[in-house]
Image: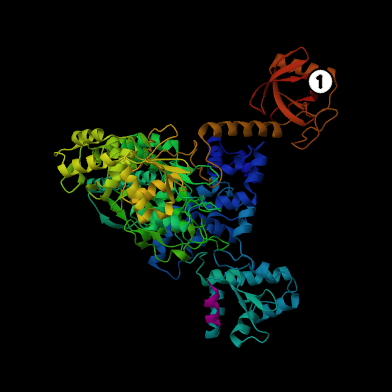
Amino acid sequence: MGTTTPPRTLAEALRARGDDSLAGLLRARPDLLNPVPNDITQLATRAGTRASVVRALEHLDRFALQTAEALAVAPDPAPYETLLSLLTGDGLDDGEQHDEAGAAIAAALPGALATLREQALVWGEDDRLRLVRTARELLAPSPQHPSPTGLGPTVAEATAGMSPGRLQEILTATGLPATHDPVSAVAALSALFTDRTRMAELLDSAPVEALSVLDRLVWGPPYGEVTPNPTPPVKWLRDRGLLLPVSTRTVVLPREAALHLRAGRAHRVPEPVPPALAAVAERDPQAVDRAAAGQAFTALATVEELLKLWNGGGPTILRAGGLSVRELKRTATALDVPEPIAAFWVELAYGAGLLASDGETDERYAPTPASDEWLDLPAADRWTHLATAWLAATRTPGLVGGQDAKGRALSALGPELDRSAAPDVRRRVLALFAGLPPGTAPDPETLLRRLRWERPLRGGPAPAAPAAPSPGGTTSGGGAEGTDLRSRLALWTLNEAELLGITGRGALSAQARALLEEGEKAAAVRLAPLLPEPLDHVLLQADLTAVAPGPLERPLADMLSVLADVESKGGATVYRFTPGSVRRALDAGRAATDLHAFLAAHSRTPVPQPLSYLIDDVARRHGHLRIGAASAYVRCDDEAVLNEILADRRSTGLRLRRLAPTVLASQADPGPLLEALRDMGYAPAAESADGDVLITRAGARRTPPRTPPVPVPEGPPVPDDTLLGAAVRAIRAGDTAATVARKETPDSPSSPGPSGALPRTTPAETLATVQAAAMTGATVWIGYVNADGAASQRVIAPVRVEGGFVTAYDHTADEIRTYPLHRITGVAELAEEA
């Protein structure tokens, strides 16, 4: 490398890279690929734009960012030793502690510098390191945008425009020889501030109060306000240039003086090593897996219950979108969980494509057709579907109950809950979990510190929201109001991972590791043995209850949920049979004999007589009354029953009148009439216009086919290897066409470059040149105008010339193409390499 010419521009530095290095740049900064640059020069220009540089800086870890910040306040270009000195300091005030920190920084700096080089934020050899101009502008200090290092401008920058007389006064006060040359005066003052011995002597003569002023400014911000008549300590500092004027009321501590006071360090606390994760507890990995599997089973049961709850049509949708506070509270009560956790389950089912809007005029939420397919899957596959959807979701239920920037409440399933950073934060949190030994539960505080070290510039203030719910319904992460969004997302991730069964007792489960590293199938294989096997039986008891000692097979659970009401949940579910629940089963088309046979087939205990009597009694009265549409009518073969209804004071509001001995008419609709008579203790049945009994089956409402909500990406997606390879080839080919040397032609410059004029030759010369190139295998440079009139220049290797067309390998497009000869403006041979 000693004989090669150092690159003079970022484009030259990129051009000297290998294909793998260019692919690494495009992988780290995928925004540079949209669209694919034409050549290396365009790639370098795009890599230096403000938006792209800001995005690249946001993806740096803290030490790589501190390295870039140090380069921003270093001379341009800066040798490696200067950069290292800015990060370690001179060590004269730290002793052994400095030696240990300096060794860590020296060990980590090559890696940080390699990261900056890979992302095209730094270029040049170690003796001439250069930070790209846009990054220097973003990180360098100014009154409007103070430097992250807390350093102010240099003496030369702060004294720009200062009168020579004032410079002479400063030199005289510091004991420096007078000079009438402003450049020499600034250089002398800078040399004084960077000379440790002379600077120490100057500060030894300073008043104690003046040193206190410097102590307040040394670590930033370096700017301070002064009055027209400053105090003696401030006047002493200003007279000697230790405080230089920025305006009539503002002074600044120059960078050279601040670095002396800091012992040469650009940062108060360099952080070359990521913070270590502290463990809260070391648990048995098998216990962790079992706990996570138990929570996964609870998650499946909760989502299934939510689908069942909204089976016949869920809550209405607010005009602005989402669930109302009242509907969320109802859902939380039905699921027996706190409202923040209910919001999480609702958002999870929505993100997994199991719930959606039905699109009707009276718009409601309802299960999608995909929910039926999901319910048919094995339990382990159902869990991996939910976990995968959660990992990729940009929906953040933790924001529910907070306010947006305009002070409007954020509701569950509302349109304002998407946060593009959420998937990245979840993946990073779980990656930190995965880096720990199995069974280790990390301390949340150290985990947050690690995340902030990895991405110090990401996130920012977020809308106010309540603290994240824990699995027990309490809140955690106190003080989240004042933390950045990514920290709050990390806290929510910890709680949601526990709720979903990704973690168990605070540690990552084996099935979650498999999901992250191997995919859904491997995770399902690991989880399946840990989930309880569904049962095909219940235990019937004499008090009209049934006990399910575990999860039930789906057909049994579906039928039992119609025939009985859930009384309690837990390790075993208790169902209670009531007249209303039996009537519900009869309304669904089941006969009494069917119910007896069902219970006998699925009970490990004999069917109790009270339950048999209950079924027979309800069945005997079921359908004795018939309700149809008149507005509505009541039909019964037993006149005494109708007489009883008419005499009942509770039927007054139904406005019934007798049409025939066995028929009553009502002005109420059939639905309210059915409910009113059931409330009076009867068991009426609805009938159709043909007189047939209408069977009402539970849960028939489904939305049209809906796709799950597409997560809002945070920036462009990372390209795959195939796209990267094609992009690098296209950029190389375009660069070859733009930079290749060309022979001089009579009508065109020898090397016009990308923006030069196209070659101009006569049709005969063009034909002769490309024919000769086809015979010799040479490569030529052509100007070409396409059918739309767009002109371009290309480097081609002609293969065949016939019929007014030239077929050639186009180095610019990296493929074989055919060009009409009449569209070629001219051709020039390429100059031979020197």
Instruction: Give residue 352's position: percent from left, percent from top.
Output: 43, 42
Residue drawn at (66%, 36%), measured in percent from left and top? Answer: 39
Residue drawn at (80%, 23%), measured in percent from left and top? Answer: 823
Instruction: Give residue 20's position: percent from left, percent from top.
Output: 53, 36
Front residue of 338 and 13: 338
Is there any visible trace of residue 450 in the rendered image?
A: no
Q: Most prominent secondary structure in the magenta stretch?
A: helix
- Residue highlighted by disc 1: 822
Counting every numbered tag in the picture gives 1
Going by the picture, which residue comes out furthest to the left? 606
| Residue type of the residue flagged with mark 1 | His
Q: Let me know if residue 213 is in the magenta part.
A: yes
- Name the quadrant of the C terminus: top right
In the depicted structure, whether residue 435 falls above or below residue 461: above
Q: Quadrant of residue 327?
A: bottom left
Q: What's drawn in magenta, residue-wise?
A: 210-218
Instruction: Give residue 484's position: percent from left, percent from top.
Output: 48, 61
